[in-house]
Image: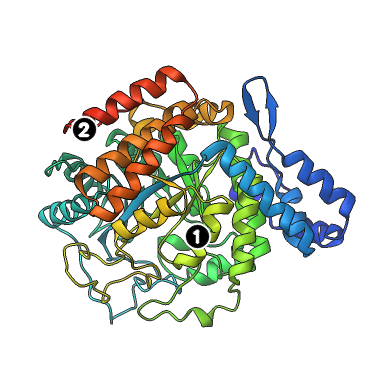
Amino acid sequence: MYDPKSLCADDFISHEEILATLAYAEENKNNKELIAQILEKARPRKEGSSTICAGLTHREASVLLACEDPEILGQIYALAEEIKLAYYGNRIVIFAPLYLSNYCINGCVYCPYHRKNKNIPRKKLSQEEVRQEVIALQDMGHKRLAIEAGEDPQNNPIEYILECIKTIYSIQHKNGAIRRVNVNIAATTVEEYRMLKEAGIGTYILFQETYHKESYLKLHPTGPKHDYNYHTEAMDRAMEGGIDDVGLGVLFGLELYKYEFAGLLMHAEHLEAVHGVGPHTISVPRIKHADDIDPSAFDNGISDEIFAKLCALIRIAVPYTGMIISTRESQAVREKVIRLGVSQISGASRTSVGGYTKEERPTDTEQFDVSDQRTLDEVIKWLMELGYIPSFCTACYREGRTGDRFMSLCKTGQIQNCCHPNALMTLKEYLMDYASEETRVVGEALIQAELSNIPKEQVRRIAKEHLEQIAEGIRDFRF
């Protein structure tokens, strides 16, 4: 029986409820009166000085996903853009993944790190190698990392992950500093989540891969990850361990996308029902080619058009949740979905262990092929020319504005007086320390134009003062 408040995965991700949802969506995909009501419910509305969005249930959102009317699709896209601007403005947060180790004891059939793959060289970074990778990332201008490691208790125990986090935070190189470390490692215990929290991590990210339990068990035939319930219930243990920012995601292409979409939203509803706060982020990766992985072997791949629709509907259904898209996707795809709801992107990513210190992009230990291979400077310039503010901001995490405190700021719109000036100040740092001359010219013009969009006059005045101080060499201001 479906119960979003249950702590058992089989209850809050109910197979029967998803099937019933998909049947309901199919029955109502041409019900224009119902669809109009759903869209109206999702529209932002003013309550005093706040902008409020109701979001959508998994059933309501699934009806919109099933609808194939081009006119309705246009309305979905327009609404997604409206919600994106209401809560995230034109800011795009920038991060990079850092692969620590590709040792793994799991048998995941879609990942080249699986235990039986004898083609891929196994590598684990020493602390000195971690240091060199971080310096290389700092020299690009990165301030926010997502660390990745395979599941291997012998080679990648929690002590190793904690030591790497400590090393990363300790490195001050020129004007570089990593100010936030997000963690994407295997499901673990409450005690180990507590240790990660104490180490100062930002968001804990764990992709479900697929919510279809039968498919999950086949896709993960061996290793600890085979335990569907333990994996699916990980976010509850993370929150019990004190981590209040968690990130969900499925790997689109493994199972039917309508099933995954419903399961993903049910997981978000579960977190809200049990912990009072939904996911901090949702990632939307699609399966890609890798060392011994052929995406065509999985017959549930989705087109760019369906992918864009999914991104738009996630934004509408969970309006306050950040959305992440990686360099798995091409420049063209990223450009489209940023407009429809994505708020965080990676830049200049290398998905191999030790990849950032190499002059040429290594491919022998890549977890997946990178479609967008531009430099960070090229990505920053591209975003600004599209009218976006690339943000290296980590202030909310460092000021304790996480979990329900972040969501409260987001829902009332007050975050505009924090995030907008913080984005401009961190962009100014990037322009001063790392940007090419062409990028700097574009960025300085953007900053001047965007200052007027800071709502409060006092905040705007202080931001201008800080921007002048950054030009003089002082760093790390934040609201």
Q: Is residue 348 above or below residue 203?
A: below
Would you say 434 lies left or right of 411 here? Answer: left
Which amino acid, mark 2?
Arg
Residue in the picture at 49% in, 45% down: 281
Would you say 251 lies left or right of 272 here? Answer: left
Residue in the picture at 40% in, 24% down: 460
Q: Is residue 254 above or below residue 262?
A: below
Q: Which residue is mark 2?
A: 475
Could you tell me residue 126's position as x and y percent? 13, 57
Q: Decide which of 77, 468 is in the foreground and name it.
A: 468
The residues bearing labels 1 and 2 have C-alpha atoms spaced at a distance of 30 Å
Q: Decide which of 402, 334 is in the foreground and name it.
A: 334
Q: Are marks 1 and 2 in contact (CB under 8 Å)?
A: no
Could you tell me residue 298's position as x and y percent? 55, 78
Where on the picture, by quarter, is residue 424? Answer: top left
Can you see residue 287? yes
Can you see residue 67? no
Q: Which residue is mark 1?
A: 335
| Residues packed near mark 1 inside 10 Å, few (<14), some (14 to 19) or many (20 plus) | some
Where on the picture, by quarter, is residue 21? Answer: bottom right
Would you say 359 lies left or right of 1 here? Answer: left
Could you tell me residue 162's position as x and y percent? 24, 44
Q: Earlier in the sequence, mark 1 or mark 2?
A: 1
Q: Decide which of 263, 477 is in the foreground and name it.
A: 477
Residue in the picture at 24% in, 65% down: 353
Residue in the picture at 71% in, 47% down: 2
User: Which element carries disc 2, helix, strand or loop?
Assistant: loop
User: Which element carries disc 1, helix, strand or loop?
Assistant: helix
Which amino acid, mark 1?
Glu
